[in-house]
C-alpha cells in the first residue's frame, strides 16, 4: 500500500513577539509536528474534502514551544 501524500500550505503565519532569528526554528518545529501528527493519526476526515480551510488564530507563549503547539492547534482545527 502506497502512503498518502498530504500537502499543507500555510499562507500566512504571524509570529508576534518572536525574535526574527527564531522564525525559522518555529516554522521547522511546526512542520515537524504536523508531519508527525499526520503520520501517526492520519488525515482528518473533514480535511479530505476541503480545498481551503481557515485555521483561525491562536496565542501561545515563547518561541521554543510555539511551533509544536501551533501545529497541534492547526491539526485539531482540521478535525472539526
Image (spheres, rainbow, N blue to C red):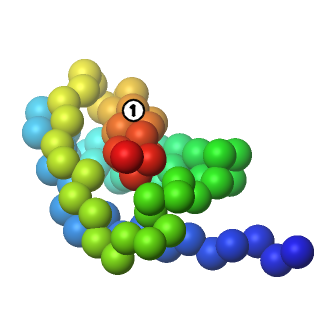
| Residue 73 coordinates in the image, percent (x, y) | 36, 38
- Looking at the image, the residue that sits furthest to the left is 16
* The quarter of the displayed image where residue 54 is located: bottom left
**Residue at (44, 72) in percent of width and height:** 49
* The quarter of the displayed image where residue 10 is located: bottom left
Viewer can see residue 67:
no
Q: Is residue 54 left or right of residue 71?
A: left
From the viewer's side, name the closer residue of 4 and 25. 4
Query: In the displayed structure, would residue 49 be above or below residue 36?
Result: below
Query: In the displayed structure, would residue 16 be above or below residue 53?
Result: above
Q: Is residue 48 left or right of residue 60?
A: right
Quadrant holding the N terminus: bottom right
Query: In the displayed structure, would residue 59 be above or below residue 78?
Result: above
For the image shown, how many numbered marks are present on the structure? 1
**Residue at (29, 71) in percent of width and height:** 52
| Residue 31 coordinates in the image, percent (x, y) | 48, 54
- Looking at the image, the residue that sits furthest to the top is 61
**Residue at (63, 75) in percent of width and height:** 5
**Residue at (44, 59) in percent of width and height:** 46
Badge 1 density bin: few <14, some 14–19, many ≥20, Cα 10 Å? some
* The quarter of the displayed image where residue 42 is located: bottom right
Q: Is residue 43 left or right of residue 63?
A: right
Dot 1 corresponds to which residue? 69
SS for callout 1: helix
Viewer can see residue 73:
yes
Amino acid at each position: 500500500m502506497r502512503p498518502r501524500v498530504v500537502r499543507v500550505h500555510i499562507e500566512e503565519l504571524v509570529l508576534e513577539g518572536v525574535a526574527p532569528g527564531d522564525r525559522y526554528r518555529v516554522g521547522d518545529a511546526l512542520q515537524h509536528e504536523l508531519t508527525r501528527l499526520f503520520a501517526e493519526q492520519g488525515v482528518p476526515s473533514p480535511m479530505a474534502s476541503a480545498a481551503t480551510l481557515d485555521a483561525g488564530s491562536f496565542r501561545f507563549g515563547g518561541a521554543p514551544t510555539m511551533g509544536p503547539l501551533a501545529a497541534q492547534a492547526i491539526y485539531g482545527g482540521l478535525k472539526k
